[in-house]
Amino acid sequence: MNHQEQGKRKRASVKRPKNSAKNGRAKPTPTKLRVIGGDMRGRPIEYHGEEFTRPMKDNIRENLFNILGRAVRGAICFDMFAGTGALAIESLSRGAISAVAIEQSNRAASYIRKTTESLSIESKVKILVGDAFRWSEQVLIPPADPDDPLIGVPWIVFVCPPYILWEEELGKLNQIINRVLTNAPPGSVLVVEAEKKFDIESLPKGEWDVRVYGNTQLAFIEPAMTCGMRL
């Protein structure tokens, strides 16, 4: 046997790891997050494992909802950059009456749908696939029908985008925030997530309650009301 044949046999005997991609990078493995509290506490949330989705850490999500407290109960949740849908699902577990989850990735949206089906809450979650900036113009508005039972129902709005968008699309993100501050009913709460280094002063003016957890900061604000009129 010559050296060339020996080389071929050696190469043939080397097995690729089952989860390896052709370029040598490990293929993302679907994993499961969990609901932190409420009626569905401990139930799984499907996560596809791809890097383009950055799930909020469990301890931060727990602190977030501890701060929101009773405000979630009876509210409508808007998860503007849903990712895994964990914030929308957690809101429903803690008493929100319905949720809107907006996600640009079809694959990520399919995992949200899979989770809602496994939890039997698909009727309470509207999943919208596409650009959150455009969808915000349609969903973050008061009901047009004066007899709509959702008139006056508080909102819980999560603006937790990929961190890079605070650099690249700050103006558009602030448009979403201003739309909430203008249209949200009394008792609503808006939650923003960004990196610790992000300057909160870049957000629209208001009484922001800022909490820092490691490299993450959360900012909470309630739309201001004076004599029954939105400021």
Image: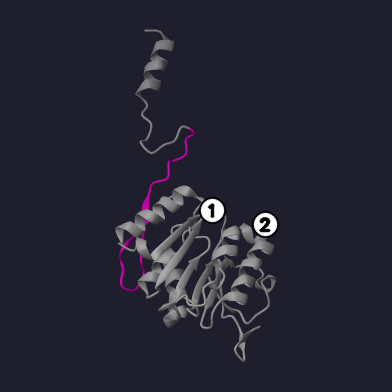
Quadrant of the image occupied by residue 173:
bottom right
Q: Say which element carries label 2.
A: helix
Q: Say which element carries label 1.
A: loop
Return the residue nearer the eye: 217 or 119. 119
- Which residue lies most toward the top here? 1
Kindly tell me whether residue 198 is visible in this rendering. no
Return the residue nearer the eye: 141 or 115. 141
Residue under circle 2? 168
**Percent coordinates x, y for residue 90 in the rendering:** 39, 68
**Marks 2 and 1, the one that precedes in the sequence:** 1
Would you call the spot at circle 2 few (<14 residues within 10 Å), some (14-19), or many (20 or more)? few
Quadrant of the image occupied by residue 26:
top left
In the rendered view, tell whether residue 227 sits above or below residue 211.
below
Display coloring: one colour
Quadrant of the image occupied by residue 34:
bottom left
Residue range of the region highlighted in magenta in the rendering? 23-47
Q: What is the three-letter code of the residue carrying label 2?
A: Glu
**Percent coordinates x, y for residue 209 in the rendering:** 57, 80
In the rendered view, tell whether residue 228 sits above or below residue 189.
below
From the image, give the main secondary structure of the stretch colored magenta. Answer: loop
Residue under circle 1? 130
Q: Is residue 108 left or right of residue 183?
A: left
In the image, what residue occupies the spot 50% across and 75% down? 155
Q: The N terminus is located in which quarter?
A: top left
Q: Is residue 222 left or right of residue 114?
A: right
Would you call the spot at circle 1 few (<14 residues within 10 Å), some (14-19), or many (20 or more)? some
